[in-house]
Image: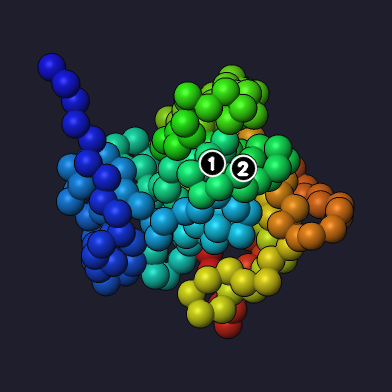
Amino acid sequence: MEGVVIEDCNDAPDWDDGRARGDPTKGCAVSGGGYYRTGGDVKGNWASIMNNVMGMAQHLQKSTWGTPQTRPGCWPTPDALEVGCTRQGTLGMNATEARSHFGMWAITSSPLILGLDFRDKAAVDFAWPIIANKEVLAVNRAWPASTFGGGTPGRLVLTDGAWAGGRIMNKTKQVWAKNVSATSVAVLFVNVGDTPQSISVAFDAAAAGGPTQVREDRDVNE
């Protein structure tokens, strides 16, 4: 018997984005209990990658207008992976950008949907060390029971961006974290800026339930 997975492509924001105006589980309920997109089409370049993953950051925030969406049976996604994709021309990301892209999809528990052409040897050779990284894949799959209904796995715990107009803007650095067991946390550091920089975070604050630095006139998370 063949299985069918339906992806909702962000067609109806009233139930798609889990905002306070509706049941935050509706996105998966309408799509049949699988996964749904948190934004528009992703493209094979760094700016598009960051734009889409910010949709995940907002879904994963504990705030007055939304609740964490990611959990077994309901998997929001910032769209398919662009690692190794050439559908829009030559490879749009270098190896560092592609590795960071894969890491952000993994740590947010996003479905890892490959988009590259496996007939293209150069694309496969480029992508394989990234998409076949067993340690990163294990982070993506991890879902410790201690976090279900309690802590929030796979979330943005620190950024220098500012909350404006419903989005995180003017960011140059980010720290993501996800509980991978009852005693361990995976941490991802991302330099979003154009120049090298140092990023640090206290490990006790890097737990997936820790506070972010994103604020407007109130904290955007608990």
Residue drawn at (20%, 47%) of the image: 31
* Type of the residue with mark 1: Thr
Q: CA distance from mark 1 to mark 2?
A: 5 Å
* Nearest to the observer: residue 196 or residue 188: 196
Which residue has dot 1 on it?
86
Q: Secondary structure at mark 1?
A: loop
Q: Position of residue 95 (x, y in %)?
A: 70, 37
* Type of the residue with mark 2: Leu
Q: Is residue 109 visible?
A: no
Q: Secondary structure at mark 2?
A: loop
Q: Is residue 162 left or right of residue 116?
A: right
Q: Point out the image quarter for the N terminus.
A: top left
Q: Are marks 1 and 2 in contact (CB under 8 Å)?
A: yes
10 Å neighbourhood of mark 1: few (<14), some, or many (≥20)?
some
* Nearest to the observer: residue 39 or residue 45: 45
Q: Position of residue 145 (x, y in %)?
A: 43, 30
**Residue sitting at the far bottom:** 217
Which residue has dot 2 on it?
91
Residue drawn at (30%, 59%) of the image: 10
